[in-house]
Amino acid sequence: MSRAIVLVGPPGSGKGTQAGRLAGRLGMVQVSTGDMLRAAARAGTDKGLKAKALIDSGQLVPDEMIIDMLADRIDEPDTGNGVILDGFPRTLPQAHALDALLDEREMSLSNVIEIAVPDELIVERITGRFACASCGANYHEVYKKPARDGVCDACGATEFTKRKDDTVETVMRRINSYHDQTGPVLPYYSEKGLLASVNGARPIDEVTAALERAVE
Ligand code: AMP
């Protein structure tokens, strides 16, 4: 039976980075609903265009839309060793849908890990983020600069982009939505005995080590 691990955390908690690392180490696949939505928006699909306006303004996309997208993604052939979900579920109805979706596929939810970061840290972390326009490698103006200024470490490209939803105003809205809409997901999993929490305010490698301990 293949398994699923869920990472829950506020914007800027490092869920994406950590999900990628964990997936690599455990031989599982990272599934980021945010990345899926941004790809759909770039591709200009109906769903993508509808999602784009919501993402850019810091609101969640409707549950039905994201649940369908996630189900399709889990049904792709590369998920046989399990999935690390990064950014899903973000609401209680999504958590319920995930239970049903995994049951139908005889997959089990083995861990839900909260990456906790205080609100004060989030704005600084997010507004400094940027990425290589060519390969998507992630950087930060203070915490993770490219070794050579203006040159991507991973692919050598010199063009960079920032996410449109990484502005102070939008981040504030995303933090509020995290507390109001995603907050109730934590007690739901805690009652099931699945929840662990790691301190996401520490350096990236320490958070990775804590996550690895949590999923052992
Ligand atoms: P992220 O890359 O995880 O920060 O997600 C970026 C944006 O995509 C969020 O602010 C939401 O607008 C949207 N999004 C991603 N995942 C979900 C989800 N599970 N439910 C609703 N909206 C989502």
Image (cartoon, rainbow, N blue to C red):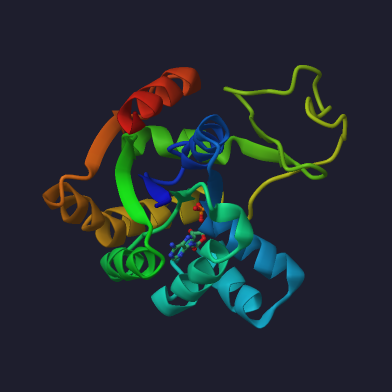
Q: Quadrant of the C terminus?
A: top left
Residue in front for this viewpoint, 187 or 180: 187
Residue 165 in sight here = no
Camera-nearest residue between 100 and 12: 100
Give the x, y percent position of residue 15: 46, 40
Which residue occupies 40% across, 74% down?
63
Residue 173 lies in what quarter of the image?
Answer: bottom left
Residue 179 in the figure: left or right of residue 107: left
In the orientation shown, which residue stands out farthest toward the right?
A: 157
Q: Which residue is at the far front?
A: 1
Q: Position of residue 67 (x, y in %)?
A: 44, 72
Residue at 48% of width from left, 61% of height from top? 58
Residue 166 visible in rendering:
yes
Total of numbered circles in the picture?
Answer: 0
- The answer to whether 216 appears left or right of 22 in the picture is left
In front of the other: 216 or 156: 216
Picture layout, residue 129 above or below residue 148: below
Query: Which residue is pictured at 58% across the width and 34% down the height?
Result: 24
Percent across and percent down for residue 124 are: 48, 34
Return the residue found at the far left.
191
Question: In the displayed structure, would residue 124 be above or below residue 84?
Answer: above
- x 55%, y 54%: residue: 79
Q: Quadrant of residue 153?
A: top right
Q: Nearer the viewer, residue 12 or 211?
A: 211
The percent coordinates of residue 174 (x first, y second) are 41, 55
